[in-house]
Amino acid sequence: MSEKQPYVKQTIENEVGYIEFFHPAHNSLPGELLSKLAQTITEAGENDDIKVIVLKSGGDRTFCAGASFNELININDEATGKVFFSGFANVINAMRKCPKFIIGRIQGKTVGGGVGLAASTDYCMATKFASIKLSELNIGIGPFVVGPAIERKMGLSAMSQIAIDANSFYSAEWAKNKGLFTNVFETTEDLDEAVKTTAEHLCTYNPEAMLEMKKVFWKGTEEWDELLSKRAQTSGRLVLSEFTKEKLKGFK
């Protein structure tokens, strides 16, 4: 598989399902990749050969740069906008409904929708290079779709801080203090070792107990299918505003 081609792939090792996504543009996620990612997570949840899931991205720098800018620039009507922003909603909901624990492996910077993915894992580990940013307000929209996932994990105060301060990267240590990351490691090698050890140890637990715990963790999110769909509609409308159209021209 060429490292230059976008992909979503799954490998199984010692009952751990490793789901990896990659895109040459800093692991940004266009609609097609988001759709495949949601489907792969759902299928892994139904696969009896997998007891625990690890979500990771390819490459050694950026974990995820968020939504695909090229697709964002080409949105010309509200219906297309809603479909575009529903991509991340579908992945978050797939992670929420997945009956297995999902461990996040965050090796580097993560922006926008990528922060939403990290926040939707059940146990998230990172390197010291994994700073986070919510940049959506910069272009006249907001982190509406990923906001509930980030607020659930980090609290409204932390979510609102990074949503308003849309120009700044916040350190991995800050994200750990706010509850997004459980551990922050010096190197990717240390991170990978810890992810593998943790995932394989979880495989020795009772799957039924883990399923019941997962339900407890996600209690109160039962309406998210509808909520995130509404949020996607809001973003789809705002992305068509004159303000955003002008801003996006500057990025072309």
Image (cartoon, rainbow, N blue to C red):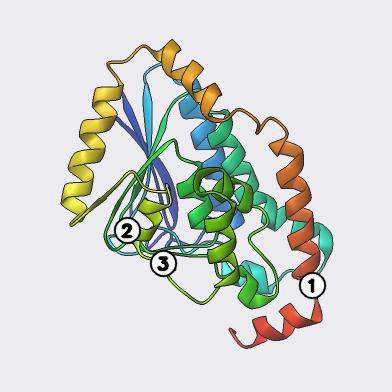
**Mark 1 to mark 3 CA distance (whole Å):** 29 Å
Mark found first going from the N terminus, 1 or 3: 3
**Cβ atoms under marks 1 and 3 closer than 8 Å:** no
Question: Is 242 drawn above or below residue 18 in the view shown?
Answer: below
Number of marks in the rendered image: 3
**Mark 1 to mark 2 CA distance (whole Å):** 36 Å
Q: Nearer the viewer, mark 1 or mark 2?
A: 2
| Drawn side of residue 116 relative to residue 148, left or right | left
Under tag 3, what secondary structure?
A: loop
- Pointer 2 residue: 173
Furthest residue toward front: 157
- Pointer 3 residue: 170
- Pointer 1 residue: 240
Q: Amino acid at mark 1?
A: Leu
Place of residue 147 in the rendered image (x, y in percent of width and height, measured from the top left): 62, 53
Corner quadrant of residue 14: top left
Q: Amino acid at mark 3?
A: Tyr
Mark found first going from the N terminus, 1 or 2: 2
Residue at point 63% right, 67% down?
A: 71
Q: Which mark is residue 21?
A: none
Under tag 2, what secondary structure?
A: helix
Place of residue 61 in the rendered image (x, y in percent of width and height, measured from the top left): 31, 64
* Res. 3 in view: no
Residue at point 49% right, 56% down?
A: 114
